[in-house]
């Protein structure tokens, strides 16, 4: 078998010297590409993913803020409506303390009109439900005196307690023996929602209503 002879000038030292820088540059470039692929590219992808997450979170935050603003405006409108309804309902009732003041005023009116109250009896009212915001208190009043005094007494009470939470019902005047007897129901609508005390519930004299008492 014949020997293979390599050309003596196949590896030229001068050519090899020229190729070494090229080989080194190529190797360095490959190393840099490998470094980029192994380190920088994953980092860049991670940064991009986080950027997209931040963008999505920002968009979600903007949407939540817009929804919250809408809910806030809706809640504010509902609160305003509720306050208006509450203000309207407050005027329909009086408090327990004010109810006691009303009864006291009724007695004061009786004294001013020379009428004697012989009975003020609390009547059973409707059963209060769990969601009921007010109570209905009914008092059966019986008083005697002259006819003109009794009529004056009813008018004075109506004038002094001029409030829609106070109602006079079932009025009647009957003659018993030598005197006239007035019976009527005083209906009071009381609630914890009631506002400040009724203006005008005082012990001023009867001259503020149709002049002086006819029996004075």
Image (spheres, grey):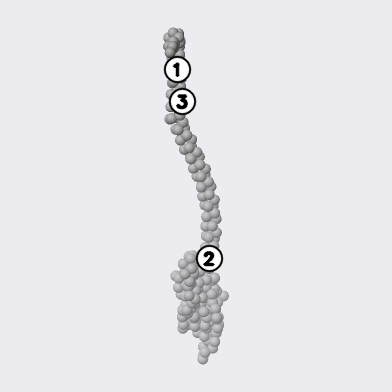
State yes or no: discs 1 and 3 in contact (Cβ < 8 Å).
no
Residue ID for mark 2: 89
Q: Is residue 119 above or below residue 60?
A: below
> In percent of the image, x 52 and y 60: which residue is there?
83
Instruction: Tell me residue 76's x, y (percent).
Output: 53, 54
Which residue matches tag 3?
Answer: 33
Q: Position of residue 97 (x, y in %)?
A: 44, 70
Q: Residue at x 52, y 57 (%)?
A: 79
Hey, which residue is sitting farthest right in the picture? 210
Q: Secondary structure at mark 3?
A: helix
Please tell me whether residue 54 is drawn above or below residue 114 in the rendered image: above
C-alpha gap between disc 2 and disc 3: 80 Å
Mark 2 lies on a secondary structure that is helix
Choose mark 2 or mark 3, whichever is in front: 3
- Whether residue 42 is visible, yes or no, is yes
Query: Would you name the residue on which mark 1 appears?
Result: 23
């Amino acid at each position: 078998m014949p020997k293979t002879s390599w050309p003596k000038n196949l590896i030229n030292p001068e050519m090899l010297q020229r190729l070494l820088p090229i080989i080194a540059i190529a190797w360095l470039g490959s190393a840099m590409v490998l470094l980029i692929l192994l380190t920088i590219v994953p980092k860049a992808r991670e940064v991009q993913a986080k950027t997209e997450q931040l963008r999505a979170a920002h968009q979600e935050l903007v949407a939540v803020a817009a929804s919250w603003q809408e809910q806030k405006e809706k809640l504010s409108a509902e609160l305003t409506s509720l306050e208006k309804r509450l203000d309207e309902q407050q005027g329909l009732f009086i408090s327990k303390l004010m109810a006691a003041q009303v009864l006291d005023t009724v007695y004061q009116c009786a004294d001013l009109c020379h009428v004697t109250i012989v009975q003020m009896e609390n009547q059973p009212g409707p059963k209060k439900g769990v969601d009921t915001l007010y109570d209905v208190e009914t008092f059966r009043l019986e008083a005697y005196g002259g006819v003109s005094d009794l009529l004056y007494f009813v008018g004075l009470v109506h004038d002094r307690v001029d409030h829609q939470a106070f109602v006079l019902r079932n009025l009647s005047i009957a003659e018993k023996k030598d005197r006239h007897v007035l019976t009527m129901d005083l209906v009071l609508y009381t609630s914890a929602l009631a506002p400040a005390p009724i203006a005008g519930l005082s012990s001023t004299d009867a001259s503020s209503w149709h002049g002086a008492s006819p029996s004075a």
